[in-house]
Image: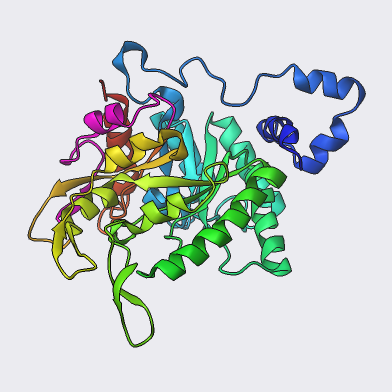
């Protein structure tokens, strides 16, 4: 696909069409009608911070991992919202206008049953549209090798993303769990392939999501171990090296702001090539501000400081912790452009089945209240 095909394809996604359907419809009067439709996402409150609002209504999102207990519940045995349809309806009532999937599995008894099909994706899209919610991405997977089979599998995931109207496709894991520069170089090369394919063929931005270890220091210098691997660091962090070695047109990041602050707490020093210990404090907002629009998505996950824990924080509903989100959103630039998805890994509770959706309401209200 040529670059000039990408914008029409994005329009097709906004209309709920596959690329194939769009191309078939793009002749005669159908093409005229389609080109008259406004580009998806072109909303008056989608940019800027009118009235000091840091997160416009059209950008208030949630990743469904936060309410995974609700999507996986049996509606036949629970009085609470259960399955995708009911959960999407509840999130719409709360006020969310965006969501990020964490897979497409739900309880077999929920409306629609098995949604891991193209027809299932179309049904999900209908429920999203009915409730005024846009899908922005999915925590799927990026293949670990580049073969004809993995490219076909990736294309299939992109087709589902297009049906759902997404602008992004991604993964919830780091590009590699390795500390070694050679493995990060290999990951960068692979992601460049899939990122270019996602954009040129499907009109999607490929993104990776970080945990704290991805912002620890890369082993890229110093004496080699018995396997020929470096044992010390030049001071660059793993994801910083990944950013420098991937194409900014095709590879993007979703910063998990909580885990970035955990990295700030945990990963403060490295052993330099000469054996000395060097202190280096991580600044998450500064990393984003250097190339703000390379971070189209955030995980807006809050945490209360607790230095008795290894991570230095414990997760809390958004707006009830100690992470200064007002300052963060002001510092990163591109005001009102990013898509922050509320996430809280520990929101589900067996003892309190309604808790994850209750926390979703508290967190939405606090996200909406941010001013700057």
Residue at the (26%, 33%) spot, across then down: 328
Image quadrant of residue 51? top left
Type of secondary structure dominating the magenta stretch: loop
Residue 317 rendering spot, x and y as whole percentages: 25, 43
Q: Residue furthest bottom?
A: 226
Image quadrant of residue 331? top left
Residue at the (16%, 53%) spot, across then down: 265
Residue 339 rendering spot, x and y as whole percentages: 43, 34
Q: Which residues are magenta?
A: 311-338
As for residue 141 lying within the magenta part, the answer is no
**Pick the front one: 61 or 146:** 146
Residue at the (17%, 70%) spot, across then down: 275
Image quadrant of residue 55? top left
Q: Residue furthest front?
A: 274
* 88 is higher (above) or lower (below) than 130: below
As for residue 333 lying within the magenta part, the answer is yes
Question: Would residue 23 appear left or right of 123 to someone viewing this image?
Answer: right
Q: Residue furthest left?
A: 308
**Pick the front one: 40 or 211:** 211
* 164 is higher (above) or lower (below) than 228: above
Residue 132 rendering spot, x and y as whole percentages: 54, 28
**Pick the front one: 363 or 79:** 363
Quarter of the image with the N terminus is top right
Q: Residue furthest right?
A: 28
Quarter of the image with the C terminus is top left
Residue 30 rendering spot, x and y as whole percentages: 86, 24
């Amino acid at each position: 696909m040529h670059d000039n095909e990408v914008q029409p394809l994005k329009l097709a996604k906004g209309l709920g069409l596959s690329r194939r359907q769009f191309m078939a419809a793009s002749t005669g009067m159908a093409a005229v009608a389609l080109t008259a439709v406004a580009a998806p996402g072109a909303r008056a409150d989608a940019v800027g911070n009118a009235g000091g609002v840091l997160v416009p209504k059209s950008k208030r999102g949630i990743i469904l991992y936060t309410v995974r207990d609700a999507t996986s519940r049996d509606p036949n045995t629970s009085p609470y919202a259960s399955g995708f349809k009911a959960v999407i309806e509840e999130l719409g009532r709360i006020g969310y206008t965006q969501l990020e999937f964490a897979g497409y599995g739900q309880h077999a008894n929920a409306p629609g049953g098995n949604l891991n099909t193209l027809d299932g994706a179309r049904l999900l899209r209908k429920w999203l549209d009915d409730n005024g919610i846009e899908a922005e991405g999915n925590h799927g997977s990026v293949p670990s090798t580049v073969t004809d089979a993995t490219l076909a599998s990736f294309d299939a995931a992109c087709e589902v993303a297009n049906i759902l109207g997404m602008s992004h496709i991604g993964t919830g894991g780091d590009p590699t769990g390795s500390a070694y520069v050679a493995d990060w170089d290999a990951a960068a090369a692979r992601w460049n392939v899939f990122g270019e394919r996602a954009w040129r063929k499907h009109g999607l931005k490929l993104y990776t999501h970080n945990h704290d270890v991805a912002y620890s220091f890369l082993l890229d210098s110093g004496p080699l171990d018995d396997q020929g691997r470096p044992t010390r660091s030049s001071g660059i962090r793993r994801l910083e090296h990944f950013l420098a070695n991937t194409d900014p047109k095709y590879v993007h990041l979703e910063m998990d702001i909580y885990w970035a602050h955990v990295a700030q707490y945990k990963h403060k020093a490295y052993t330099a090539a000469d054996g000395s210990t060097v202190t280096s404090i991580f600044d998450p907002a500064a990393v984003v501000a250097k190339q703000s629009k390379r971070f189209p998505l955030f995980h807006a996950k809050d945490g209360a400081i607790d230095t008795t824990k290894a991570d230095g924080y414990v997760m809390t509903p958004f707006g009830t912790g100690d992470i200064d989100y007002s300052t963060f959103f002001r510092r990163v630039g591109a005001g009102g452009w990013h898509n922050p998805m509320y996430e809280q890994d520990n929101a589900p509770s067996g003892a309190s089945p309604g808790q994850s959706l209750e926390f979703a309401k508290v967190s939405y209200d606090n996200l909406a209240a941010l001013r700057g």
